[in-house]
Amino acid sequence: MRLWSWLRKWFRKSGVIAVIRLEGVISTGGRLGGGINDQSMAPLIEKAFELGKLKALALIINSPGGSPSQSSLLAARIIRLSDEKNIPVYAFCEDVAASGGYWLACSANEIFADENSIVGSIGVISAGFGFHEFISRQGVERRIYTSGEEKSMLDPFRPEKKDEIARLKLIQKSIHQNFKDFVSLRRGTRIEGKKVFTGEVWEAERAKELGLIDGIGHLEPMLKEKYGQDIKFKKLDRKRGIFSRFGKASVDGIIDAVNENVYFSKFRL
């Protein structure tokens, strides 16, 4: 009788909403199942859109950004599948949806956030260190051999060159323009005439005023309001690697954790 009761309850459901968490730094590697990138998330995204009785895909986003290429690839995959399957996508921001994290949020048809979420940072940044004075004081001689006169551009072990900085800024400007074009396409008239491309971040209420998000609210109550109280939520998770399953640490895992902490730290209050 329990099985029959469960089956009746299942068929009374008005449909399914797939829920996927996009949490962490957006990076190429994704060691030990950490980080966000197109390669690691693609199977999960594809699986979500193949679910029976699917009504919508909900993305839980908590990311300070990272790789612009991976942000673009993953967002494009979500939009393509959403269009092909005619399934709407909703993004729900947690602590941070900044830079590449906001890029991912814009793959959704509508974006919502907690009232304390930090949203925005539509810009491009490159950071590094200069060690040339340090190694000079230590009596260390730098030796590097290249084929191609610009192969060692922005080498941190030699003084900066103005022409190299200028070339870097051109690359940044181009990527920033791609970011702006994508946000403009996805948010449309909601951000028209508003100053949102400066690299600033805002709390949720201000982000709503600027058109960067559509509202303040949480996943389950908002989607139950849209799709009915009987809607079923199906949470999809990535498979953990063998190291994480057995609780073993590794150098790569520690590096990922440190890297993620650095990215998130600028948005912590």
Image (cartoon, rainbow, N blue to C red):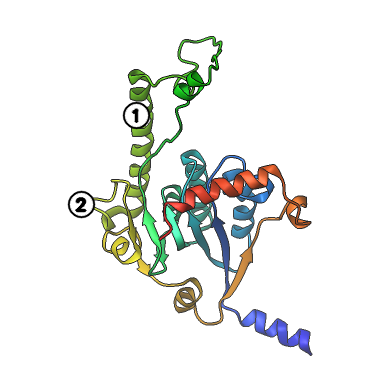
- Tell me the CA gap for discs 2 and 1: 25 Å
Sequence-wise first label, 2 or 1: 1
- Label 2 belongs to which residue? 193
Q: Amino acid at mark 2?
A: Gly
Location of residue 15 with respect to 211 vertically, above or below: below
Horizontal arrangement in the rendering, residue 60 relative to residue 51 (left or right): left
The image position of residue 25, as x and y in percent, is: 53, 48
Exactly how many numbered labels are in the figure?
A: 2
Element type at mark 1: helix
Q: Amino acid at mark 1?
A: Lys
Front residue (pair 243, 184):
243
Horizontal arrangement in the rendering, residue 126 relative to residue 28 (left or right): left
Q: Is residue 30 visible?
A: no
Front residue (pair 25, 39):
25
Q: Tell me which residue sits at (50%, 10%) in the image.
A: 148
CB under 8 Å between callouts 2 and 1? no
Location of residue 81 with respect to 95 vertically, above or below: above
Element type at mark 2: loop
Give the crowd class for mark 2: few <14, some 14-19, many >=20 residues within 10 Å. few
The image position of residue 101, as x and y in percent, is: 46, 52
Location of residue 200 with respect to 14 vertically, above or below: above
- Label 1 belongs to which residue? 169
Q: Tell me which residue sits at (49%, 77%) in the image.
A: 224
* Res 10 label: none
